[in-house]
Image: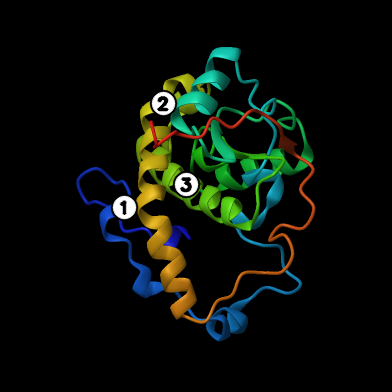
Amino acid sequence: LGRLLPVDDESGSANGESCCCDRIPTPDQIAAEEKVFLPPDHLGRKEIAFGSAGRSVLSPGELDVLIRDVFRGERFFLAVGADEKNKRGLSARFRQMLRQKKGLSGLDPQEQCHIVLHAEADNLDILKSCLALCVLRQRLVGKFDGGDNFENIRTRDCIADLRYAKANSDVIFPQLLDQLTRQGWRPPLRSMLGRVSARAEWTIDYDNTDS
């Protein structure tokens, strides 16, 4: 998904008005490059891209803004912050070691934001949440990559970036679905991610367009 998002040269951010949907490969093209035995790339690692609301220790105020404002009506939301649950894990330390070998300091901005899925989220919600996460990651990498100033960043510090990711995904998502269909993709019969245990429940406040 990240490869489909054009980058604005001045701001380093995705431009939702001109989604590069013509770059979408066909299923046959993907099958030729698909990893069978090797681990998946960054977004494919469920433990990095998806998590619980408690992963970054969201405050009640942050949670309220995400659910009732920024991602109102959605069956997912994005959160920003360090993974407080797994930061001492072996896989996390290994990834940081690889990052240091590449000459990069600080935390990887791509790992400091994740998706929280509602218990009733379906495949379309999952796909849209991944699209929004890609936009947010590009935004945060452009702002913070290579520096230590991302160490203590939290959701409340990135509300504008979260709104940007949500707005862009709203624009791009319908185009993406249309182009995926044209390229021969079909929705899977089962969940795209298999069983994802890290789901949450909250009251979804849908916009009432009739009033």
Dot placed on the residue nearer the N-terminal end, 1 or 2: 1
Question: Could you tell me the amino acid type at mark 1?
Answer: Gly
Above/below status of 4 relative to 140: below
What's the residue at 43%, 57% (across, down)? 173
Asked if labels 2 and 1 touch by Cβ distance under 8 angstroms, the answer is: no
> To which residue does mark 1 refer?
16
Which residue in the protein does label 2 denote? 159
User: Is residue 4 in view?
Assistant: no
Vertical arrangement, residue 72 with respect to residue 182, above or below: above
* Separation of marks 1 and 2 at Cα, in angstroms: 18 Å
Taking the spot 58% from the left edge, 50% from the top edge, the residue there is: 125
Q: Residues within 10 Å of mark 3 (few under 14, many from 20)?
A: many
Earlier along the polypeptide chain: callout 3 or callout 2? 3
| Residue 178 in sight | yes
Q: Secondary structure at mark 1?
A: helix
Q: Label 3: which residue? A: 132
